[in-house]
Image (cartoon, rainbow, N blue to C red):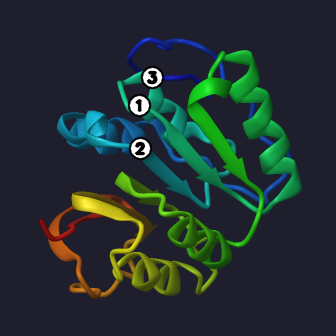
Amino acid sequence: MRVIAGALKGRRLTTPKGRTTRPTADQVRIACLDTLMPYLEAGPFLDLFAGAGGVGIEALSRGAPSACFVEQDRAAVTALEDNIDRLGLAGRAKVLRQDVLRALGALAREGARFGVVFLDPPYASADGVPALERLARGDCLLPGAVVVAQHSTKAPPPAEPGALTLWKSRRFGETTLTFFRGGA
């Protein structure tokens, strides 16, 4: 896997061995980040269920000022930290090795706010809806934030979770990206 565009274009990314993480396909990453380009500089990027960090690193490469990565799998965090170190992103990246809901609570208590949030929970888990609902409270979002959920096409997220409004959806076979906007 490589960074697709931006300042780090072409740089190789380490991915964890095994089947515990599912890297976001290049086609999906391109469509997601191309859509997010106008919003990336608005504030920090939050990559939930980050895996090796491909989406968040792509956001940093394309102009996001900073990124916070949340992942609890040890092998994925090892790959993520290697990517951050090798690409010289340590000053702009923070890694939280913990459960997403616990991390969102901690970030809210710290007063952390994000302009763009990407969440890509394991398709077979039920973690995506609670994480989206937690985000929809708005206490981790900047005004007008964009939230993107990557999910199985067969299991769409709620259409109007809390303070988030459905903006658009893009389908890529069995994978769909659903974009939400936060209130102003």
Q: Nearer the viewer, mark 2 or mark 3?
A: 2
Labels 2 & 1 near each other (Cβ < 8 A): yes
Residue 15 percent coordinates (x, y): 74, 37
Please indicate whether residue 157 sits to the left or right of residue 124 in the image: left
Crowd band around label 2 with a 10 angstrom C-alpha radius: few (<14), some (14–19), many (20+): many
Labels 3 & 1 near each other (Cβ < 8 A): no
Crowd band around label 3 with a 10 angstrom C-alpha radius: few (<14), some (14–19), many (20+): some
Q: Is residue 176 visible?
A: no
Q: Amino acid at mark 3?
A: Ser
Q: Nearer the viewer, mark 3 or mark 1?
A: 1
Disc 1 target residue: 65
Please indicate whether residue 103 sits to the left or right of residue 145 in the image: right
Residue 59 percent coordinates (x, y): 42, 34
In the structure shown, which secondary structural element does the residue marked by tag 1 occupy?
Answer: loop
Identify whether 122 is placed above or below 28: below
Q: Is residue 69 visible?
A: yes
Disc 3 target residue: 61
**How much space separates mark 2 and mark 3, taking CA atoms?**
13 Å
Q: Nearer the viewer, residue 108 or 40?
A: 108
Q: Nearer the viewer, residue 156 or 184?
A: 184
Residue at 42% in and 78% down = 132
Going by the picture, which residue comes out furthest to the front? 110
Disc sitting over residue 50 in the figure: none
Residue at 75% in and 22% down = 85
In the structure shown, which secondary structural element does the residue marked by tag 2 occupy?
Answer: loop
Identify whether 29 is placed above or below 8: below
- Which image quadrant for residue 147? bottom left
Crowd band around label 1 with a 10 angstrom C-alpha radius: few (<14), some (14–19), many (20+): some
Disc 2 target residue: 44
Q: Which quarter shows the N terminus? A: top right
Q: Nearer the viewer, residue 27 or 7?
A: 7
**How much space separates mark 3 and mark 1, taking CA atoms?**
9 Å
